[in-house]
Amino acid sequence: MSGHSKWSTIKRKKEKTDNARAKVFTKIGRELAVAVKQGGPDPASNSKLKDVIAKAKAANIPNDNIERAIKKAAGDSDGSNYEEIIYEGYGPSGVAIIVEALTDNRNRTAGDVRHFFDKYGGNMGQSGCVSFLFSRAGVINIEKEDVDEEKLMEAAIEAGAEDFLTEDEEVFEVRTAPNDLGMVRDALEAAGYSFVSAEVEYIPSTTVKLTSEDDLKNISTMLECFEDNDDVQAVWHNWENPEDAE
């Protein structure tokens, strides 16, 4: 599915600088802190923390960094209280965009997000204005190299996966119900598979093609601004980016 473009985003991030990697580490560290504060520091009894740890490992964050972040959050009773907020809006020519944020300052984050929408030819809307154009699913990406497709598909189905996609040249995509992501991921991990990514994503029901050079420039810059913002954890959209099909 070229619309949600998560895998292509991961590929682009792999090519970025150490500074960009540090930003990814910071954002996942924030997710770890929120998960610990909500459900405690033990992943065995905190499924959300377990999911974020898996995400951190997929992003190649060292185990020492993960453990340090968990310990810090567990003992940080006076630390920042981050709030999970979802912003929705439209980009150029009606591209639907969902922005997931973790912030300790709602006014700052809302102002930044609105600014990016306005500056690059879009507009931020009310909650629910575009989410009906997406469905949520657990998505597990596994690199195709040295992986037997039939064996992986069989293991995924046995683990409870809902769909198995092979269109991408580099990864197999396993889809699950949102609440089954951890169960399927753990079963595949136990079977010896490793992941490029494993998280709940927004999957668009339709996609939007852009042809105007101005629209193409604006949507690319807008998405980069969102992704580079410290408070933004993830960005989902239904733009059919030609690069995603490469």
Image: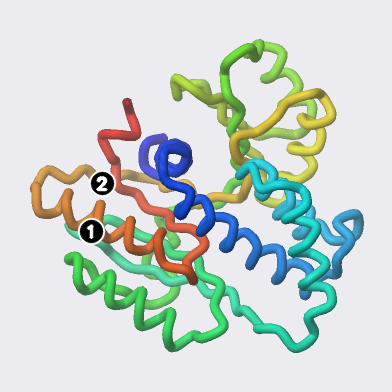
Amino acid beneath label 1:
Gly
Q: Position of residue 59 (x, y in %)?
A: 61, 44
Q: What number of labels is visible?
A: 2
Q: Is residue 84 left or right of residue 40?
A: left
Q: Position of residue 185 (x, y in %)?
A: 74, 38
Q: Position of residue 30 (x, y in %)?
A: 63, 67
Which residue lies under the disc numbered 1? 94
The crowding category of the residue bearing disc 1, from other C-alpha atoms within 10 Å (few below 14, some 14 to 19, many at least 20), is some
Which residue lies under the disc numbered 2? 208
112 lies above or below 217: below
Residue sitting at 18 percent across and 57 percent down? 218
Spatial CA span between label 1 and label 2? 8 Å
Q: Tell which residue pokes out farthest to the front in this image.
A: 18
83 lies above or below 156: below
* SS state under label 1: helix
Residue sitting at 27 percent across and 77 percent down? 115
* SS state under label 2: loop
Q: Could you tell me if the residues under marks 1 and 2 are in contact, i.e. CB atoms within 8 Å?
A: yes
Residue sitting at 35 percent across and 77 percent down? 112
What number is the disc on residue 218?
A: none
Sooner in the amino-acid sequence: mark 1 or mark 2: 1
Amino acid beneath label 2:
Val
Residue sitting at 33 percent across and 68 percent down? 89
